[in-house]
Image: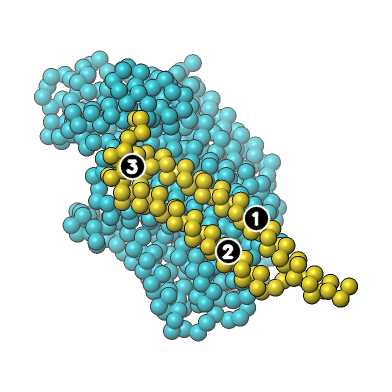
Amino acid sequence: MSSTSANSYWKANIKLVLSLLSVWFLISFVCGILLVDVLDNIRLKGFKLGFWIAQQGSILTFIALILIYIRAMDKLDSQYKQAASNDTQNTVGESQ
Amino acid sequence: MSVQLWTYLFVFLSFGLYIGIAIWSRAGSTKEFYVAGGGVHPVANGMATAADWMSAASFISMTGLISFLGRDGTFYLMGWTGGYVLLALLLAPYLRKFGKFTVPDFIGDRYYSQTARLVAVFCAIVISFIYVCGQMQGAGIVFSRFLEVDVTTGVIIGMAIVFFYAVLGGMKGITYTQVAQYCVLIFAFMVPAIFISIMMTGQVIPQIGFGSELVDGSGYLLDRLDGLSQELGFATYTEGQRSTQDVFFITAALMFGTAGLPHVIIRFFTVPNVRDARISAGYAMIFIAILYTTAPTVAAFARTNLIDSVSEAEYSAMPDWFGKWETTNLISFDDKNNDGKIQYLGDTERNELTVSADIMVMANPEIAGLPNWVVALVTAGALAAALSTAAGLLLVISTSVAHDMLKRTFMPSITEKQELLSARLSIFIAVLIAGYVGMNPPAYVAQVVAFAFGLAAASFFPAIVLGIFQKKMNKQGAISGMAAGFIFTASYIIYFKLINPEASTADNWLFGISPEGIGTLGTIINVGFACTIAKFAPDPPDDVQELVENIRLPSEA
């Protein structure tokens, strides 16, 4: 296992987690709490938008975030596995 | 068939199921006892996590609280679900990769210190114990109200059932009973919700009915509810009353606390690998969201229905349910102006009706005139919610004692058989104490349960996250951070809730943060202490830094 591929794996992971957590913060704390009164001026049928985000939309967003995370990490894991096996092939297999 | 008969039928059937599962899934080794052998399917673990998580409070009290709080009740909804995003992204995969049995295991090994381990054991036991007493009390109340036995008998029945499957099966028994309990509780919660949604809006899906027009032609549900609230002098349902910073802090405290509760975290030790830990966090989130997106709809339906049924109605003409709940003191009527009608008003001087938040879920099917079997179903659901959470918490207490305190600290030489015996013995003792507290509840138990979250937020959550994401975090930093966060949060809560409850007003609160939200400040204090003190102490040893490197990588590599 090479430490460069481990490093880039960790960096990619941090980047992913940070971007998902920004959405998490934006939807729940910013839209659901801080700006809720402003968003309430927009109406979607029977709902005020701010109220809907606070009591429904935020929870649906949380589901989406975790599902995106699962898929992105699967992809990252397989890339990393490939990189790691390439590394070992390069060191062991080049003489063949 | 009467409600009573249906209730007995559902409760006996569901208890029979739990006992059957317990016998089928006996635990033979400590690994089976602590983490169900580490072979639980992610879907099963997702359901078990959801049942573990959704307690008597989620099932019985939360909807009612939202009903009375309106939009302010949002902090329960976002707080108790948003924590799962943190759990899935920041904790679960890494703790699974670490691959031991308990949270103090991680804290002790990562911070290479028996002191850190013992601080973690102490926090885990205090948090879980506070929480489990509330569950026992909840189970006792449900028993006494619906099966018409007294609270003591109710608690003893609940204790016996939990004891039976927790002692026999450990984590393995608990996991599979929790799967069954999830199915029971979600069915019991959804059926009345769907019924009442169809009745009031003609929509089958409550989440859609929530934003639809009422069938009686009086406009959108939420507009009607806002209108009724204003008319009677209550706060407008879809507008907030609490200060924005307080709602912000309470939401954050509940989120951090959710991610730091040991009985939830250990569920992720039970799946086969890191990938499954992520997937089961996703399933848990979906299973929990089913209840949490339905709860606010039931809150609004029930509130509208309640106002419509009681406001200006003749007291003598009220249906059966009214008298039934009056005898339990959860509804009380005082005819102040002697007109024989019920005035239900926001103005406390003239208001004649007091309704406890706890009955909104329990009485809702009756108020809405739903069939008897639906009314009875709610009892079985509430019991499933209370017992599943109690079992998960008792397991944390027993592993903390048998594994972290005996095996890893004071008596490392005990055999696996002795460890298993002491794990079972400590569940037995914990059940007895929890049962005793459940029968003789101190007045503040119900309030204190919510503060288990503040304590978890201020102690475990930062210590674990820093342990994974800050390679250089050392034991001095972590221990002082956990101690500072825990002591600060506990003192603030004890002062405002137990010592001087009259002083608990927004003017006296620190930065206007209520005791419910103070855990967020505790988290910040924890991180501040940890990072500052860590700078002045030596880096962790190389093998610990390697351990951190290792848990950051996927297990296959």
Q: Camera-side residue: B323 or B251?
A: B251
The local crowd at label 2, few if under 14, some if 14 to 19, many if 20 or more residues have their Cα within 10 Å, is: some
Real-space Cα separation, disc 1 to disc 2, in angstroms = 11 Å
User: Share a chain, discs 2 and 3?
Assistant: yes
Q: Which chain is cyan?
A: B
Q: Which residue is pictured at 46% across the width and 28% down the height?
A: B205
Q: Camera-side residue: A41 or A81?
A: A41
Q: Which residue is pictured at 23% across the width and 36% down the height?
A: B236
Chain A: drawing colour: yellow
Quarter holding the C terminus of chain B is: bottom right
Amino acid on which the number 3 mark rests in the picture: Gly
Amino acid on which the number 1 mark rests in the picture: Lys
Which residue is identified by label 3?
A: A50
Which residue is identified by label 2?
A: A12
Q: In which quarter of the image is residue B216?
A: top left
Measured from the top left, where is residue A77 in percent x and y? Answer: 66, 59
First reached walking from the N terminus: tag 2 or tag 3: 2
Q: In this view, does B361 lie to the left or right of B51?
A: left
Which residue is identified by label 1?
A: A75
